[in-house]
Amino acid sequence: MESTMMFREAKKLLSDMTDKLSDAELQRLLFEVAKERAESLPPAEGLRFLFALDADLYPVQGWLSVAYGGGLHTKHRHTRYHDFFVDRVRAGERVLDIGCGNGALSSDVAERSGAQVVGIDLSSENIATARSLHSHPRASYQVPDVLVHPLQGPFDVVILSNVLEHIEQRVEFLRRMVAAAVPARIVLRVPVFERDWRVPLKKELGIEYRLDPTHFTEYTLESFRDEMASADLEITHQEALWSEIWAEVRPSLTVSGTNGV
């Protein structure tokens, strides 16, 4: 309790003292304070201190990017990742977008490819946003739990855009999804562990190294290849962009059954 009060008082004092500083002056002050503290610690502790600051700032950068983008994260246009999915869907195909989020990708695929898209997401709030902001005559949105409730196929294409890393039993999920959706191909993107030298260093230091603490994995090229093989999926296209694996895979075996997504 005493520590919390001291923190609040220190925060107010610092805020009062820095109100008249310009952004550049405040940036310099914060940098000098952080640098001085980090350099006063043993190297491992100094690194943990700086990495913790970086981790705290990352989500703030995210939501500010959404605000700056008018409600849509600027990564959608900077990475142009929609193009990867649109280019792999044909007019008239039936597409299942699992983990569709706010529906931006589902709507774009429907509009630009001429496909019929069903977007599903665990969050009813996301689905409400999708229906409100990204409605399209060829896109519909639902809220089934893909890990529990069956969703009837067939679908020509399944989209998994930054979804697999959030699932613990991924091979089982992929097998059940293929059995239910019966897709000819699956188009996906997943985060890469080997995106920066600081990632294995953070892991070595025993601190959070994932882009998102809800990730059960972040892939190496080898672990992605092995996981697809374990799920009886054949990689037909793969590239590495923006610290992610972007791939198209297809069932290597004919799978049928009623256990579904």
Image (cartoon, rainbow, N blue to C red):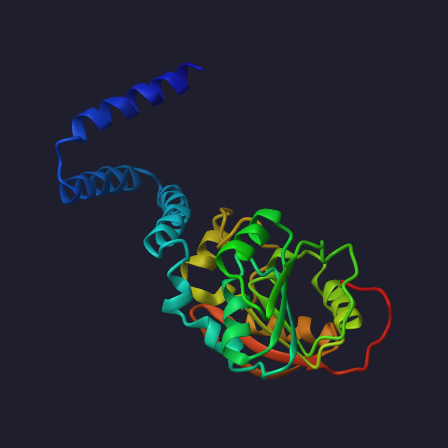
Specify the farthest residue to the front. Answer: 137
Horizontally, residue 51 falls left or right of residue 225, namely left
Quadrant into which the N terminus falls: top left
Residue shown at 41% from the left, 57% from the top: 72
Q: Nearer the viewer, residue 240 or 86?
A: 86
Horizontally, residue 128 falls left or right of residue 202, namely right
Quarter of the view holding residue 229: bottom right
Residue shown at 50% from the left, 48% from the top: 208
User: In the picture shown, does residue 223 fall above or below 254?
Assistant: above
Rendering coords of residue 112 (x, y %): 49, 77
Rendering coords of residue 172 (x, y %): 76, 64
Quadrant into which the C terminus falls: bottom right
Specify the farthest residue to the top. Answer: 2
Quarter of the view holding residue 65: bottom left
Can residue 223 be seen here? The reply is: no
Quarter of the view holding residue 228: bottom right
Q: How many marks?
A: 0
Residue shown at 48% from the left, 55% from the top: 211
Rendering coords of residue 153 (x, y %): 76, 71
Residue shown at 62% from the left, 63% from the top: 140
Q: Nearer the viewer, residue 174 or 88?
A: 88
Can residue 195 be seen here? The reply is: yes
